Image (cartoon, helix red, strand yellow):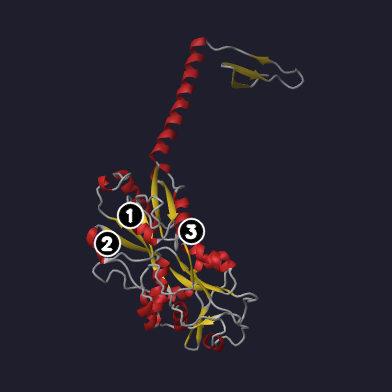
Amino acid sequence: AKSSRVWLVSGGQWRSEGRRPEGRGRSVAVRSRPPGRVASRSRALEAMHLLCHALLAAGAAAKLNLRAGGASFPAAMYQDVSFAYSFRKPASASADISYHSVGSSAGKRWIKDGTQRCEDDVRPCVTLDWAASDSLLTESDYAAQPDLQMFPTLAGAVVPIFNLPNHTEGEGQDLLLTPTLVSKIFRGAVTRWDHPEIVSINPLLALPAERILLCVRADGSGTTEIFKKALSAFEQEFKEQVGADSGTRWGLANVTRRRLNSGVATYVAHTPYSLGYSVLAEAESAGLPFAALLKGDHRVRASPTSVAYALAELGLEIGNEREVLTADVHNALGLMAWPICGYTYLVMRTDPLPAEVPGSSLETRRAVVNFWRWFYTDSHG
């Protein structure tokens, strides 16, 4: 019987392994190839390894690092989608994006001029490839840099978060406030938890005879702008005394200030009898209760559904005012609509010269456009 043969490479030599018929034992024969052919194959293998390493290095070099930052409102979403985008295939079509949650005001300032100092005049700012903001650009911003543009990316709710010891969530246990009452509290007209206006609409809650400890944002914030705009629409006195901008002025003597949504949420979580405001996602992530609002005889809670009702009522007016792609969606009147919500926006310079933006290049600009095309249009994005 003929033996079957398998060719193997061992120690730079070829060998054949033969198998005799059953019962006759097993033999192995080793035959060396001519030295020239062995050396030629070794060189070929080495060249193949070098080529693979070169291709991998070229792919890594083609992957750009993009700098982004701004609003804390959508920070978790941007960080998640940026991470997902980094795994796009081929890798050369992707980019690594670092998103820094520094607040809307800082994001807008950095996209305009990264050489400016931050608000505390200590931390150096950086130039961004794109920014995010929940607060709007001003007329002076557009006049100074006409190539600035805002594009809506998503909408969300801002909610009054609170800490009442012994409060338990459940059916009929929501803390209820009216829109006007929220305005009164945050301008200092209602200062105690057992105020008659709060007690009258919460008959099932044992409200304490304690002062309301308010916490607001210490930094320029788009979340603050959404909140203030809604409260200004709820009550004329709030509009006159506090205003509807994204700044830190509240006109209150006894108020605690914290940076970012996470800072306000952390303060409220650890401070009994406190009340603040944050985006819905931050409140849910921290496990904080938030007030429902009484609109007429109907109570409404912040949720994706109640935000969708607000957008259906007010959110279709984007771009109808002098070709600026923004819209106010607060103070929706529908009974099912949450009235304290807003859009968050991508902020880009649409026509900067690379020399105007330190660290920018045509490649980074192309990578930014590719990312946002994927974000808006890819069915798997």
Residue 253: x %, y % from top left = 46, 73
Q: Is residue 107 above or below residue 24?
A: below
Q: Give SS at disc 1.
A: helix
Residue at which label 3 appears? 76
Report the side of 8 relative to 78 (left or right).
right
Residue 65: x %, y % from top left = 40, 45
Q: Give SS at disc 3.
A: helix
Residue at 50% in and 86% down:
298
Q: Which one is in front, 74 or 35?
A: 74
Q: Quadrant of residue 346?
A: bottom left
Residue at which label 2 appears? 141
Badge 1 amino acid: Ile
Mark toward the viewer: 2 or 3: 2
Q: Quadrant of residue 23?
A: top right
Where does the C terminus fall, quadrant-wise? Answer: bottom left
* Label pair 1/2, CB-CB below 8 angstroms: no
Residue 294 is labelled as none
Question: Which one is earlier in the sequence, the residue at label 3 or at label 1?
Answer: 3
Residue 236: x %, y % from top left = 37, 83
Question: Which one is earlier in the sequence, the residue at label 2 or at label 3?
Answer: 3
Q: Which one is in front, 75 or 161?
A: 161
**Label 1 environment density (alpha carbons within 10 Å; few <14, some 14–19, many ≥20):** many
Question: Which one is earlier in the sequence, the residue at label 1 or at label 2?
Answer: 1
Q: How much space separates mark 2 and mark 3, taking CA atoms?
A: 27 Å
Q: How much space separates mark 3 and mark 1, taking CA atoms?
A: 20 Å
Badge 2 amino acid: Asp
Q: Residue furthest front?
A: 253
Residue at which label 1 appears? 111
Quick check: can you spot residue 311?
no
Q: Is residue 173 above or below residue 380?
A: below
Q: Give SS at disc 2.
A: helix
